[in-house]
Image (tube, rainbow, N blue to C red):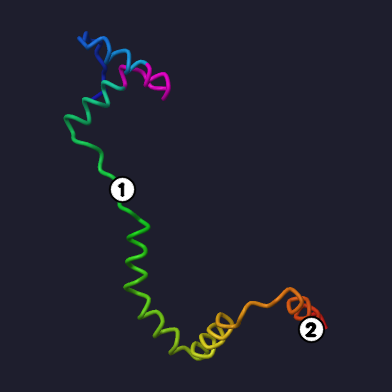
């Protein structure tokens, strides 16, 4: 069935109508659409907010991380790679002179 719209007359408080017009102009929406959206919200209930995906992902990572770490460490090079990563992470940052020396060593 085709959704047909019907023109109707509605009595509104003049101040409310003026506020609705100003809001509509600022947001590019007609007063008619504002009234329709308001009626739909009132009759159908407010729209359901999407889930907080960031919190959901963080929760899943926290739950799965221990298992993933065990699988990684059980792999042939997992423990060695983890040890290297820890050593690199715990090393103090290089000074600018040390960084220059390191680049020279790598290019030889």
Residue 92 in the image, given as x and y percentages of width and height: 61, 80
| In this view, 88 is above or below 61 | below
Horizontally, residue 108 falls left or right of residue 17, namely right
Residue 81 in the image, given as x and y percentages of width and height: 54, 86
| Secondary structure mostly seen in the magenta stretch | helix
Which residue is located at x 35 percent, y 15 percent?
Answer: 21
| In this view, 27 is above or below 57 | above
Residue 65 in the image, given as x and y percentages of width and height: 38, 76
Residue 87 in the image, given as x and y percentages of width and height: 56, 86
Which residue is located at x 33 percent, y 53 percent?
Answer: 52
Which residue is located at x 28 percent, y 45 percent?
Answer: 49
Q: Nearer the viewer, mark 2 or mark 1?
A: 2
In this view, the residue in front, 2 or 72, is 72
**The N terminus is located in which quarter?**
top left
Q: How crowded is mark 1: few (under 14 residues within 10 Å), some or many (20 or more)?
A: few
**The C terminus is located in which quarter?**
bottom right
Q: Residue 105 carries which label?
A: 2
- Give the residue pinned by disc 1: 50
Span shown in magenta: 22-33
31 magenta-colored: yes
Q: Which mark sits nearer the N-terminus, 2 or 1? A: 1
Q: Is mark 1 on a helix, strand or loop?
A: loop
42 magenta-colored: no
Horizontally, residue 53 falls left or right of residue 107, namely left
């Amino acid at each position: 069935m085709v959704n047909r719209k019907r023109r109707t007359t509605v009595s509104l408080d003049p101040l409310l109508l003026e506020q609705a017009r100003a809001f509509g102009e600022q947001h590019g929406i007609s007063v008619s659409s504002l009234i329709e959206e308001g009626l739909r919200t009132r009759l159908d209930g407010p729209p359901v907010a999407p889930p907080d995906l960031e919190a959901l992902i963080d929760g899943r990572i926290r739950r799965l991380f221990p298992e993933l770490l065990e699988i990684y460490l059980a792999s042939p090079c997992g423990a060695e790679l983890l040890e290297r990563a820890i050593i690199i992470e715990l090393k103090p940052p290089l000074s600018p002179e040390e960084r220059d020396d390191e680049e020279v060593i790598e290019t030889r």
